[in-house]
Amino acid sequence: METGQLNLPRGSFIGARAKQIPRRKKLVFLASGSQGEPLSALAKLAADNHPQVHIERNDVVVLSSRFIPGNERTINTLVNNLFKRGAEVFYDAGRAGHVSGHASRDELIELI
C-alpha cells in the first residue's frame, strides 16, 4: 500500500474569503464529514446548505474513508444526496482512494 502527501506549489491553496477563485474545473474543495455527520461541510454540500460552495452536475466527490459500522444509514443518505445533486461519487473503501483519519507514529512524533 502506498502512502504519501500532496506536494503542491505555493499559492495553490485559497481561503474561504478569497476574491479570486479559479475556474470551476480547476478547483478542488476538501471537506470533512465522510461519515455523514449532520453539521459537517460535506453534509451541508450534499443538502445544498453550504454557504460558499455548491455541488453541481458532473462534480466529482471522493469519500476517502471506510464506512464505520453504525454510520451506514447517514453515509448512504449523504451519498444519495450527492447523487441527487448530479455529482459523480466514489466511495468504495476497497479502492486506492482510502486514507486513514489517524496519524502514523512518525507523524504524531513530528506533530508533538
Image (cartoon, rainbow, N blue to C red):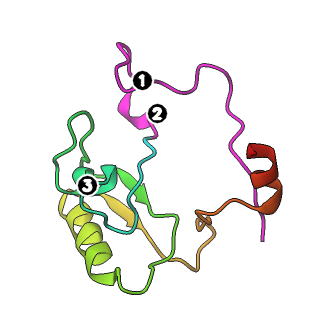
What residue sits 42% from the left and 23% below the top?
A: 22
What residue sits 46% from the left and 45% below the top?
A: 30
The residue under label 2 is which amino acid type? Lys
Mark closer to the chain start, 3 or 1: 1
Q: Position of residue 83 (x, y in %)?
A: 25, 65
- Spot the residue most to the front: 112
Q: CA distance from mark 3 to mark 1?
A: 27 Å
- In the structure shown, which secondary structural element does the residue marked by tag 2 occupy? helix
Contact between marks 2 and 1 (CB within 8 A): the answer is yes
* Left or right for 52, reference 93: left
Which portion, as a residue range, is magenta?
1-28
Residue 61 sits above or below residue 94 on the image = above
Badge number at residue 22: 1
- In the structure shown, which secondary structural element does the residue marked by tag 1 occupy? loop
- Mark 3 neighbour density, 10 Å: few (under 14) some (14–19) many (20 or more): few
Residue that label 2 marks? 26
Residue that label 3 marks? 39
